[in-house]
Amino acid sequence: MLTIIPDLFTSEQLNALRSVLRQGKFADGKLSAGKNARQRKANQELAQDQDCYEALNNVVMTGLVQHPAYLQAAMPAKIAAPIYARYSSGMGYGNHIDDPLMGSLQSRYRSDIAITIFLSEPDEYDGGELCVETSLGSSEIKLPAGHAILYPSSSIHSVKEVLSGERLVAVTWVQSYIRRDDQREILVQLDQAKQLLPDQTTLAYQQLDNCYANLFRMWAEV
């Protein structure tokens, strides 16, 4: 299931994020890659020991985790601190899936959902599309700055080579209470169906709400 979340930030917040990132210190992105992905990865990532990192997170993560569409689609149990990545001309990321477990030994989490938050406008770089393989084929995604895309970490995905300009993104991962993507999709559809009913006192609404709650109870892992 692919879920697009628009407009995570105000224009003022977005401009401030981009300004801070362009002044930050970046390192080779291979340092954070898993063993199998390292040879396919060519980008740069913001060093997390900089003073600006927490300030960026305060804006980026607040905008994401408080968004109703994120809560509905991700059903989050844990979320990782983001990686801020920069792709300039000649950089990209070949086909890979994400490591199933991430984080330090003291704070492991399962990577059920990957999230890319676009921080550059589409016309600021050529190439650089996020490609995600789904059961319906390959989707190429290049969203406006401030928009996010959620997709299963188990899906084969890549970033096409940037031909010119600069691609800035924030990337993070979620461990969901609902491990399986197909089960999350069913729950999202039920939740959306509830919201289409104008009267929450009807029997139809109550039955949908009961089905949602009981399926969540059946599938949830805590």
Image (cartoon, helix red, strand yellow):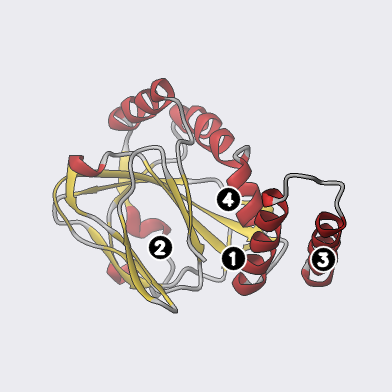
Q: Residue at x 86, y 56 (%)?
A: 206
What residue is shown with label 3? Answer: 211
Look at 65% across and 66% down and name the residue there. Answer: 184
| Left or right of 187, for residue 112 | left
Question: Left or right: where does residue 221 sit relative to residue 19?
Answer: right
Front tag of 3 and 2: 3
Question: Is residue 86 positioned above or below 1 on the image?
Answer: above
Amino acid type assigned to the residue bearing label 1 in the image: Asp
Q: Position of residue 7 (x, y in %)?
A: 45, 36
The residue where tag 1 is placed is 112
Q: Quadrant of residue 125?
A: top left
Q: Residues within 10 Å of mark 3 (few under 14, many from 20)?
A: some
The C terminus lies in quadrant: bottom right
Query: What secondary structure is found at the residue carrying circle 2?
Result: loop
Which class describes the residues within 10 Å of circle 4: few (<14), some (14-19), or many (20+)? some
Gap between marks 2 and 4, in whole Å? 15 Å
- The earlier-in-sequence mark between 1 and 3 is 1
Q: What residue is shown with label 2?
A: 33
Residue 52 numbered tag: none
Name the residue type under label 2: Ala
Residue 55 picture location, percent across and down: 50, 27
- Between residue 170 and residue 10, name the one nearer to us: 10
Where 118 sits versus 129, above or below? above
Residue 42, horizontal then vertical, whole percent: 26, 59
Tell me which residue sits at (44%, 72%) in the image.
97
- Give the Cα separation between the discs numbered 3 and 2: 40 Å
